[in-house]
Image (tube, rainbow, N blue to C red):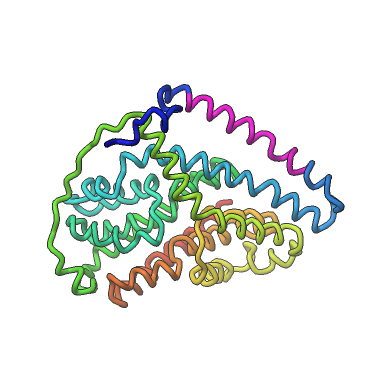
């Protein structure tokens, strides 16, 4: 029995277009109240608004609902879009493609398929079984966490469309070129033996013909799944960002994350790799660092290293990759991130 169409459980979906319009209007109205509501909340507390604590509280009270609302809205919409891009469909689209254009396609699919590091092993195995080339698989695995819709939307909301588009272009370039290089190195021998020996499977998929109501339910499911997991990282990230925003001296931050310090970009990457977060948790920290004089390229290199080269993902991938292939993956991607950091610092 298909419970997705039970009238008592899907009443908003009898008129899905009306539901989407109403939800958009309510979301936009609430979004416009965030700044005055944060100011009013700080004013109601026994805290001087111009003090360090007052500034930190205003930052936290404003950015927390802002980021959560942006994230919820985008994840809901992309949950609807992602109903067309299941793991099975993604494998089928990539299987049998030659390198080059396949790397471009894989990296582009990463934008609309926000798989996290916990999905790395099953996705990797599925791609190998479907006959997807190794380099193409890496293009997807690099792009999916680094250039997904959550990162792009939060960058757009905080820094504008120019920064978001530049980040997308350079991030996709890192994913495409890194995957192509790994593919050219012909390192299939450095897959774990049990992965290489798996039988190949058909990469077919069926389109269930889901209705708009089904897509909306998929959006709600994505919100529960993704926002339900990342909100603690958001709170921690915004709290750290609030502290940096109000308590860290601007000259101090600029001294080792500014454009003048040539070593700031590699240092940011080295700091970022051992950390574990995602775009939603790290972007508020990026915002605070920029406000304190850090260079854009440096903080975005930090962000990319956190979400594309996180230590937990590397540990998870060790289950399917030998050490030499993991080391090559880290070296190639880190080199691309360093290049992005220096390019951002040079042009902005």
Say if 327 sits above or below 309 in the image. Answer: below
Q: Is residue 73 left or right of residue 43?
A: left
Query: Is residue 282 shown to the viewer in this render?
Result: no
Write the residue at 51% across / 39% down: 73
State yes or no: residue 23 in magenta.
Answer: yes
Magenta part of the chain: 19-39
Write the residue at 69% across / 52% down: 60
Query: Is residue 160 shown to the viewer in this render?
Result: yes
Residue 239 drawn at (x, y percent): 66, 58
Towards the viewer: 191 or 57: 57
Residue 121 drawn at (x, y percent): 31, 64
Q: Is residue 3 left or right of residue 255?
A: left
Write the residue at 57% across / 71% down: 263
Say if 216 sits above or below 286 in the image. Answer: above
Residue 89 drawn at (x, y percent): 25, 45
Tell me where residue 37 sits by quadrant: top right
């Amino acid at each position: 029995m298909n419970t997705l169409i039970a009238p008592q459980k899907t009443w908003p979906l009898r008129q899905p277009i009306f539901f989407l319009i109403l939800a958009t209007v309510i979301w936009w109205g609430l979004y416009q109240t965030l700044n005055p509501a944060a100011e009013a909340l700080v004013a109601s507390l026994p805290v001087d608004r111009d003090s360090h604590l007052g500034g930190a509280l205003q930052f936290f009270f404003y950015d927390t609902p802002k980021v959560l609302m942006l994230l919820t809205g985008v994840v809901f919409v992309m949950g609807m879009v992602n109903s067309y891009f299941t793991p099975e469909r993604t494998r089928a689209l990539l299987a049998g493609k030659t390198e080059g254009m396949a790397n471009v396609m894989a990296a582009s699919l990463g934008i609309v398929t926000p798989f996290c590091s916990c999905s790395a092993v099953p996705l990797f195995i599925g791609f190998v079984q479907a006959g997807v080339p190794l380099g193409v698989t890496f293009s997807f695995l690099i792009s999916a966490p680094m250039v997904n819709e959550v990162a792009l939307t939060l960058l757009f909301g905080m820094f504008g469309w120019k920064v978001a588009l530049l980040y997308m272009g350079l991030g996709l370039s890192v994913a495409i070129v890194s995957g192509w290089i790994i593919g050219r190195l012909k390192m299939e021998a450095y897959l774990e033996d049990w992965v290489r020996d798996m039988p190949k499977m058909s990469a077919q998929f069926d389109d269930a013909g889901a209705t708009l109501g089904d897509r909306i339910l998929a959006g709600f499911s994505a919100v529960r799944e993704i926002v339900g997991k990342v909100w603690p990282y958001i709170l921690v990230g915004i709290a750290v960002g609030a502290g940096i925003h109000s308590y860290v001296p601007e000259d101090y931050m600029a001294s080792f994350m500014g454009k003048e310090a040539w070593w700031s970009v590699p240092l940011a990457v080295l700091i970022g790799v051992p950390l574990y977060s995602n775009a939603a948790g790290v972007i508020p920290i990026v915002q605070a660092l920029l406000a304190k004089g850090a260079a854009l390229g440096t903080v975005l290199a930090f962000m990319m290293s956190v979400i594309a080269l996180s230590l937990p993902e590397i540990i998870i991938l060790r289950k399917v990759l030998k050490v030499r292939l993991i080391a090559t993956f880290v070296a190639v991607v880190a080199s691309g991130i360093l290049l992005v950091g220096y390019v951002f610092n040079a042009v902005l």
